[in-house]
Structures are given as structure tokens and as C-alpha cells.
Amino acid sequence: MTGAGAGWCARIGLGMISAQAPTLSPYAIFLRTRAAVSAARYPPALNYTIAVAGYAGDAYVTNHYRGYYSRDGGKIFVDPISGEEAAHPHTPHGVNFRITYEIGWNIGAGGQLGKGFIPAGRPEASADLVGVPDLSPAYMFGMPYVAFASPAPVAGPPGLRTIAVVGVGAPAYSVAFAGTATIGGSETYELALTPLRDPKDNRLRALWVGENDYLPRRAVVAGNFTVAPMVDVPWTIDFSVVNGAPLIVDEKANQPLFMSHHRVVRDVSIAFDDVREADAAALTQRPLFQQPVSDSTLIEP
């Protein structure tokens, strides 16, 4: 990950074994990580590039997309046309057919006539390797505490007004200590997480957090995004910490992805490059959009 703004630059390296053992219980470490992630402060908005890469057959393919994230409401705007497709527009090949039909009932008595069509040809594969990434580098895989507006005043010290309540609820994971490692120059605790409920939603399975700041440096999740085949394979996520705020460096699929149109995509990685505080000039380029949800859109739950 590279950044143009001062301080917004970090790298993740390979893990190495460290010897220091924790003094806190594994679950207490996980709670401190949740608190540290919840307390992190990001710029009001970020500009970045999303690089989606992998092997489609024998060809190594990379697609680059411009992205914009606004902290206000967590809004994400992405250019749905990758830089590669903009430079070399995708041209459909062959001929597709569709069958048009009309269905009517009680036409003479004021009934209705319905019209429609059914695709009969084989749809073409998408120009995107695994879909358009509607993603933000500030996504934290369910680690932040959920804050919600208080429905009624909560008793507290005189003169203090309650703005929000943090919801904790029952534990979502059983947490065990799995060792220590050095990742990207940071000494980390490795935690093994087993979901106690909703395993499809509580996806964390392993987490490496800094011994000093408890912020995440690496995670393994049981599935990613919201559609198959991404939700069906484990992914490894690497983070950097910039100005006290954790950001995703890249997300790697740990197994091949069996896509539609009989395509198999291997060694898939989704990297966030050139992450920086948003600048007004970026909004004067090709328009960015909030993506409609479809089977070809990569979104986080």
C-alpha cells in the first residue's frame, strides 16, 4: 500500500516466530482489539485504487478500479469500468438470441396482455476477473463494536449527555491463544477463533494483533463478500496501521475460485493501492458510482 499523504504508507511482510507470551487471556486480547478498532479515527474520506488480480486459465489478469470512501455513512463510490477495460473496451463476440412471448387473458373482456422475453443464447463472461469491487480499505470484518442511538436518556454523571450506546451482546467467538509472530515488523499475538453462533456471519477464524496496540495485522476468514464462490473459500487478509488506523492491504483467496462460464480463477488477490486522504481533483475524473448489488458485485456483508 502506498500513500501520497504524509504518514499514509505501510507494508506487510512475512510472519516470523516471536517468543513473547501474553499476560492477558485470549478473549481479553480480542476484546481489546475490538475496542482499538472501534476507537480508530480515519480521514473524512479516502481515495484509493483497487487492484484485482489472478490467473484466468494460464493468463495472469489484473483489473484496476478507482475507489472513494466517505466516513459519513460509510458510503463507497467505485468506477465500474477498470482502467484496463477503459483502455481496451470489451467487444462481445458471436450472436445471442432471445425468445419474445406474449401472454393474454380475457382480452375481449378488458383483460391484460403481458409481454416479455427469455434469453436463449449463452451469455458472455464478464470483462471483470471476479466482479466489480465495491469495497473500502477501512472494512474490519465485524471487529468494531456496533454503536446505535440511545432510545432514552441513560443515567450518568451530571452534565454529560449520552450520544450513543455501544452494543456488545453475547460472545460471538470462543478465542484461544495460538502463538506469537512478527508480521510487517510488528510483534503480534495469534488468536484462533471458533464461532459460537452464526458461522456464516461470524467469519473470523484466525487473527494476528499487535502486542502494543492490539490492532489487526492479519486475519483468516472462512469466506469473503456475499456471493459464491467467494463465500465458500477461506481468505487471508493483511492489514497495515497508518496514523493509528488499520487499513486493508490485500485480501487473498486461499483456494481457486470456480466462477460462472466454467472459468477457474487461481491465486486471486484484491489489493488496495495508493490509499490517501480524498482530494477534490479525483472527483472531476470519470464518474464514480454507488454500485447496484448484483451477482458480479463484490461487497462486504
Image (spheres, grey):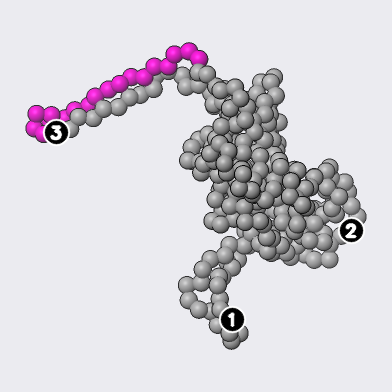
Q: Is residue 80 visible?
A: yes
Residue 32 in the image: above or below residue 233:
below
At mark 3, the secondary structure is: loop
At mark 2, the secondary structure is: loop
| Residue 276 coordinates in the image, percent (x, y) | 69, 48
Q: Nearer the viewer, mark 1 or mark 2?
A: 1
Q: Nearer the viewer, residue 219 or 21?
A: 219
At mark 1, the secondary structure is: loop
Which residue lies at the image location 66% right of the left edge and 56% below the top edge?
43
Residue 111 marker: 3
Residue 3 in the image: above or below residue 169:
above
| Residue 34 coordinates in the image, percent (x, y) | 68, 61
Q: Residues within 10 Å of mark 2 (few under 14, many from 20)?
A: few
Which residue lies at the image location 58% right of the left edge and 27% below the top edge?
86
Image quadrant assignment for residue 112: top left
Q: Tally the numbered discs.
A: 3
Residue type, numbered disc 1: Leu
Give the Cα distance between marks 3 and 2: 78 Å
Q: Residues within 10 Å of mark 1 (few under 14, many from 20)?
A: few
In the image, taking residue 109 as reference, residue 251 lies left or right, namely right
Residue indicated by mark 2: 20
Residue type, numbered disc 3: Gly
Q: Which residues are magenta?
A: 93-111
Image quadrant assignment for residue 249: top right
Residue indicated by mark 1: 160
Give the Cα distance between marks 1 and 2: 41 Å
